[in-house]
Image (cartoon, grey):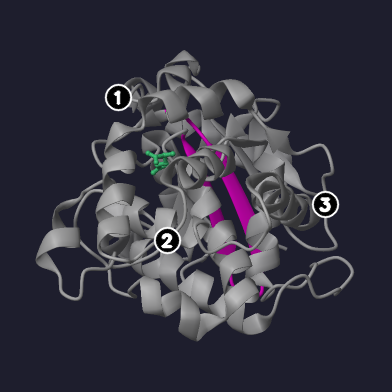
Amino acid sequence: MICENQQELESYVAHARHWTQKGKVADYIPALAKANQAALAVSIYEPGKHCFSAGEVEHKFTLQSISKVLALAVALEDIGEEAVFEHIGMEPTGDPFNSIIKLETYKPSKPLNPMINAGALAVTSLIRGSNNHERLERLLHFIQDITNNSNVKVCEEVAQSEFDTSFLNRSMCYYMKQHNVISGDVEEILELYTKQCAVEVSCRDLARIGAVFAFDGKDPDTDRRIFPTNVARICKTFMVTCGMYNASGEFAIKVGIPAKSGVSGGIMCAVPGRIGIGIFSPALDEKGNSLAGMRLLEKMAKAYDLSMF
Ligand code: GLU
């Protein structure tokens, strides 16, 4: 058993809470600026056990970059590993998530990995479907299956807000189209990407996603296979090398588990063979990770001996 009781988890949240005042809520997507700076919540999904949660767990938030892992899983299943990596590399960048620079300096001209925006946009362009509606439905169904929550849906307000202001992501798409990294209609790719980023979840949903990855693509409660082991392996490897933006190295030292964060303040963690963790706290540090969420995870990693290294 990882967490012995509710009070213990609540005390960790109480300790980390003051960090919420030291970060900054993302506002480059205007709708995200409405988030409650003071919120901090965590859920631990331990198969066969009670799902322990503490803090403002009723809050919903959008996946943002956490969706990059899920879109990658779908694309890998759709067209296979070899075809995906013809378009996207496997290396960490050390640059911010929305940086455009290595698209030009790295040859051949393809995004370095699927966790930065350029790579994620290329992944989204690979998802199969005869039109965008079908592609989104497939992705959404996949997410509903992993979360075991058929109510998970897109927050249209956040999706539209990002679509209307995505000038940098648009630029990267056009650049990649010029260099044959992506094909297809750029506006359609952006529409699908902004909707995938705007899928709305709770901490408990995130913890359950983490648990499915922790158990190599199987439903941790029923043992039903949701996606192949190899897909889980590739996704978790990217979570370790690039999941926490250009703080992934520090995170590997201080926490030591596969994790992916998003600019809405969510962090999804998969502790291999053990648990899934979902965190939400929208005040971010300068690299785009949830500040209080990172501190809370550091504390939990020590207390529950979570590091896989
Ligand atoms: N939708 C966001 C963007 O493309 C996701 C970024 C993130 O969460 O890191 O800017």
Seen at 47% across and 18% down, the residue is 31
In terms of sequence position, does the residue under pointer 1 or pointer 2 come before the other?
1
Q: Quadrant of residue 149?
A: top right
Contact check, label 1 and label 2, Cβ < 8 Å: no
- SS at mark 3 in the image: loop
Q: Position of residue 209 (x, y in %)?
A: 67, 56
Seen at 86% across and 73% down, the residue is 224
Select label 2 or label 3 by which is in front. Answer: 2
Q: Find out whether residue 272 is within the magenta segment.
A: yes
**Type of amino acid at the residue the image marks with label 1:** Lys
Of residue 25 and residue 50, the one placed in the foreground of this image is 25
Q: Which residues are magenta?
A: 265-282
Residue 22 — which label? Answer: 1
Q: Position of residue 163 (x, y in %)?
A: 45, 30
Residue 94 — which label? Answer: none
**Type of amino acid at the residue the image marks with label 3:** Asn
Q: Position of residue 56 (x, y in %)?
A: 63, 25
In terms of sequence position, does the residue under pointer 2 or pointer 3 come before the other?
3
Q: Quadrant of the N terminus?
A: bottom right
Q: What is the crowding at mark 3: few (fewer than 14 residues within 10 Å), some, or many (at least 20)?
A: some
Of residue 243 and residue 307, the one placed in the foreground of this image is 243
Select label 1 or label 2 by which is in front. Answer: 2
Residue 148 — which label? Answer: 3
Q: Which residue is mark 2?
A: 183
